[in-house]
Amino acid sequence: MGIIAWIIIGLLAGIIAKMLLPGKDPGGIIITLLIGVAGGLLGGWLGKVIFGVDSIDGFFDLSTWIAAVVGSLILLILYRVITGNRRHA
């Protein structure tokens, strides 16, 4: 996959991660989208290391999207923990 495809997947994965973990984050949507791009790369790497599968087969492959969203969720949670922004019920 090309770099443009990774950026698009990462941006969309960041949006999906934000919808799954709503709340106010410092940095706003720009930081969330950047976390999505980094999370897509992290998810692809984790899928390969942990499960031994090539989770970056193609743009329309479901495993690519799942890996990107999971990676984005991990990074979004870490970002919230590091910045101290936790949701209060």
Image: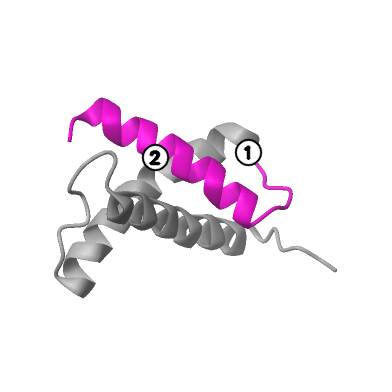
Q: Residue 39 carries which label?
A: none
Q: Picture quarter containing residue 86?
A: bottom right
Q: Tell me which segment is drawn in magenta.
A: 1-27
User: Looking at the image, which is closer to me, 54 or 35?
Assistant: 54
Is 28 rendered above or below residue 4? Answer: below
In the image, 85 versus 18, the foreground residue is: 18
Disc 2 and disc 1: Cα gap in Å?
17 Å
| Picture quadrant of residue 70 | bottom left
Q: Name the residue under label 1.
A: 27
Please name the amino acid that badge 2 sits on: Gly
In this view of the protein, which residue sits in the foreground, 10 or 32? 10
Above or below, 49 against 63 in this view is below
| Residue drawn where x is 26% and y is 55% of the image | 44
Tag 1: residue type?
Gly
Instruction: Please report the residue visible at 29 percent of the width from the left and 56 percent of the height from the top.
Output: 63
Q: Position of residue 8 (x, y in %)?
A: 37, 31
Magenta stretch holds residue 31 = no
Q: Give the left or right position of residue 11, taking residue 42 as reference.
A: right
Give the mark nearest the N terminus, 2 or 1.
2
Whether residue 18 appears in magenta in the rendering, the answer is: yes
Residue 89, percent across and down?
Answer: 85, 69
Image mark for residue 10: 2
Select label 2 or label 1 by which is in front: 2
Question: What residue is rendered at 37% in x and 45% in y?
Answer: 38
Q: How many labels does the image show?
A: 2
Q: Which residue lies most toward the right here?
A: 89
| Spot occupied by residue 68 in the image (x, y as percentages of width and height) | 37, 51
Q: Quadrant of the N terminus?
A: top left
Question: What main secondary structure does the magenta stretch of the protein show?
Answer: helix
Q: Which secondary structure, mark 1?
A: loop
